[in-house]
Amino acid sequence: MTESKTGNQIIELEITSYGSEGQGVGRKDALAVFVKGALVGERVRAEIVKNAPRFAEARLVEVLEVSQHRLEPACPNYSRCGGCDLMHMDRAHQLEFKRMKVENAFRRIGGFDAVQVQPCVPSPSTLRYRNKAVFSFRQSGGRVVSGTIEEHSHRVVAASDCLLQTETALKALQTVTKWANDLRIPAFDEASGKGILRRLMVREASTGEVMAVIIAAKRPPEEKELVSRLLSAVPSLKSIVLSLNSDRKNTGLGRACTTVFGSQRIRERILGLDYSANAQSFLQINHAQTEALYSFAVDSLMLTERDSAVDLYCGIGSISLLMAQRARSVIGIEYVSKAIEDANENAKRNGIQNASFICGAAETVLPRLVQGGMRISRLLLDPPRAGAMRPALDAISACAPNRITYVSCDPATLARDCRILVNEGGYAIECIQPFDMFPQTRHVECVVLMTKK
């Protein structure tokens, strides 16, 4: 054991497993050491950068024995940018890591000792697959630079390319950055609260329609010039939206969005149905994989014309309307009012009359419906990363649908909620199927099918 120039310990480790964020894990005596960028089967030298009572975090210094699954990351900003975690792993190893991540969550958090997780369904594309891009801006040397956010920070990593984003999104970014520099529109500074330009969001639908959302602290001058340049650079733009947000801590969309060109919405098409989406709508970011996941989720419910179903956390009705094509009736529940507006519009757009939507929190609306005597035979839930709240899970158990499909982007909260439904709702897990919705990253989407015992 040696020391670095900063006085930190440098140790040698055998990497034997992975953490949930893709870090390699080895043991030094009784201490688990997490090393970002290390692969199972490798022997590495690592510098301890953080000590805790039960674990340590370390920086990879040198790989002494190299895994056959190691790749040279294609992105020059990989070590600094927070967008990708697994670009140093080959494709097969990424998929197995994600399968094991789900399995470990069900074993350790859910307590399912005999759980079996299916192989992760690969994405047709592993680069340029995102249909939504978010870029940030900062001042550097008197100029505006653009790029992505450094991991665990708000610092902008200057980058002219991101291998996960489409050429259309990058063209829009180049245009906005050049406009800002040509016309001296300053980037917003979170520390001082001064400046204007904060972020650019680009959403590209499978129909070819594109939306650009400029997030700024205040309305920028030369707005018409920006619109003109964007339309010239990206002819497929159907919507340009301005979102004002001067909050230093909140980097997302502001409360109000103003359409400065075109329509408030763009048109997306999923499995033969048309959907209208605005700047705030939730859509999965990998279109081809979305269709694969939605097909699997709806097929798992085995809906018939006799079934009444609920789609909990329904968003803009993406899955609700697919369910309604097979079921007698579907109720979608969602707390975001704009999403419910879109869901109702999407039902009309597709001529679907047996789907209705309720605006409200799942943990409030579903218990009320159950107490009112509602009976359903099928239920799908796709909650946010935090999972379903306990009143919603209790209401699911109370209304006792025969089949439940749970769609989740977080294996930990998924395993926790499945444990409750199994222990207290009398359900059995029939299938756990992960999908690689987010190639090159540690994130994984998962579908769990449960049936009533």
Image (cartoon, rainbow, N blue to C red):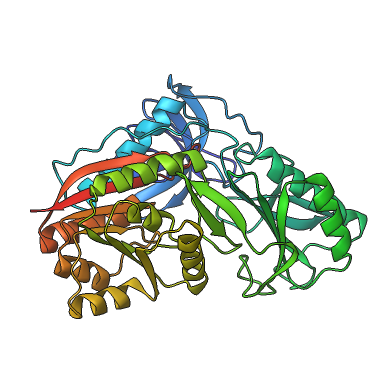
The x, y position of residue 343, in whole percent, is 46, 64
Whether residue 177 is visible: no
Residue at 76% from the left image edge and 43% from the top image edge:
171
Residue 216 relative to residue 436: left or right: right
Q: Which residue is drawn at 62% across and 67% down?
A: 253
Whole-percent x, y for residue 223 in the image: 85, 65
Q: Is 139 situated left or right of 106 in this image? A: right
- Residue 156 at least partly seen: yes
Quadrant of the drawing holding the N terminus: top left
Placement of 451 over or under 219, stated as above or below: above
Q: How many numbered badges does the structure rendering display?
A: 0
Q: Would residue 26 be found to the left or right of residue 137 on screen? A: left
Residue 425 falls in image quadrant: bottom left
Say if 62 sits above or below 8 in the image: above
Residue 307, by quadrant, is bottom left
User: 431 and 370: which one is in front?
Assistant: 370
Is 92 left or right of 147, judged from the image as shown? left
Q: Residue at x 28, y 55 (%)?
A: 327
**Viewer-nearest residue: 60 or 410:** 410
Residue, far left: 453
Q: In this orientation, which residue lies closer to the viewer: 108 or 288?
A: 288
Q: Where is residue 367 in the image (x, y as percent from the top left)?
A: 24, 76
Measured as percent of width and height from the top left, residue 441 is found at 49, 41
